Image (cartoon, rainbow, N blue to C red):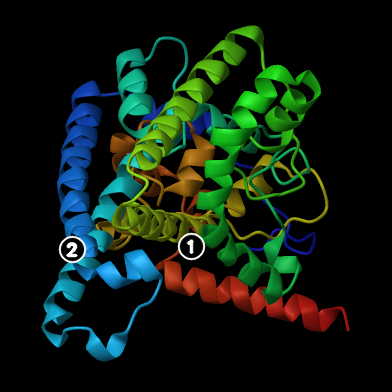
Amino acid sequence: MSTSPDNPCAPFSVGESRKIVGDLFKHNPLIYWIDFIACWAAGMFIYTHGRTYAAKLYLTDFAENWEFDWMYYPSDNSTTWILYITFTIVAALLYYRIAMFIHEIVHMSGRTMIVFRFVWNTLCGVLFLAPSFVYYPHLDHHRRRHYGTDRDGEYLPLARRGPQQIVLFMLHPLIVPPLVFVRFLFFTPLAWIIPGFRRFVHKRCSSMIIDPAYCRQLSSPGAERMFYLQEFCCFLWLLALVTIVAVNKHTLPWPFFIQSYTTAVIILTLNALRTLGAHNWENASGQMSFEEQLLDSVNYPQHPIIGEIWAPVGLRYHALHHLFPNIPYHNLGMAHRRLIKQLPTDSLYRKTSQTTLTRQLFGLWKRAKQSTQNTH
């Protein structure tokens, strides 16, 4: 999948491909609603049970004295540990899936499934402190002139920067949850009263990206209104939590904090691994041709069950998504099969597939390590 000058890309016909999948661009609202509501309800049920077991694991002495004495911890709670870990992982996987609907939402235009978008933000975006406005810079990632450049907040040439950059990237799930808490609880009211700080928050603290140097462009007035409304709802949600804690100041809800942070870290770690596998991360030389962008993206058509766990809502077809961003997730599998069947045998699209995420990650690590050796 090299995109180097020594391996030039052959022309690729988008028009030919579009004729093959032209009837697959229509969203099926029923699939969206059943998928989202079922996973949301199951996730809430399982998360609540996980929190119950977290409370059982949480000793009164620790809550009062910040001490945890393993010598006196009852050994018969090993089953409780197993149940807590199991419920936490399952709840995180379900939450991960419903959270990834944000990717579908930002690609919906006009009034497409507007009720679904509202409900998703109410039940998931605000509760998870990931409202849809933070992900709209994702559209820059799909602009051909922006992809892989400094205007693309979702791209870093990780294959050219050494393994240490990959390690640093994988550490961000540990610090993002408290940073998001601070952003919505403290930065939000300050931004309302300090215009200069407002611009800083908009440009630097309001995007779900991987490039810390990315600067978000100012939004249109209509987008700003959505921005303010979603931000305000997140602030109210956190304010309610803080108020509840303040009222019950003698009993801090540590099981809730522990369960929430653990779940968030699992979700963010899974998404970080998925992100590393979504591209080859080779570009460090500015704007890329469309063919180079296509070859830099990766599909995982094999192992659909495992693939839907680590790359839910169609995200395992990432190269196909970059080819046709508006195909809904429930049609991506069919679109891929049609393209493989009907495109020429020498089509570039056939070079975008990888067998497993593990193989892709090992390949990225190897290329990053080689890039370090080549600089010495």
Q: Which residue is mark 1?
A: 273
Displayed quadrant of residue 162: bottom right
Q: Please state the horizontal and vertical placement of residue 371, each as a whole percent of the image.
A: 77, 75
The residue mark sitting in front, 1 or 2, is 2
Which amino acid type is shown beneath numbered disc 1? Answer: Leu
Crowdedness near tag 2: few (<14), some (14–19) or many (≥20) residues, C-alpha within 10 Å: many
Q: Quadrant of residue 29?
A: top left
| 242 or 327, nearer to the observer | 242
Q: Residue at x 37, y 54 (%)?
A: 257
- Residue lying at 19% horizontally and 50% vertically, measured from the top left: 48
Mark 1 and mark 2 lie on one chain; the one further toward the N terminus is 2
Locate residue 331 relative to residue 350 in the image: left or right: left
Q: Callout 2, which amino acid?
A: Tyr
Horizontal and vertical percent for residue 50?
Answer: 20, 58
Q: As rendered, which of 286 and 227 lies closer to the eye?
A: 227
Q: Tell me the quarter of the picture where residue 64 sits.
A: bottom left
Residue 175: x, y in percent? 57, 58
**Residue lying farthest to the bottom in this orientation:** 71
Disc 2 target residue: 53
Image: 289 above or below 84 = above
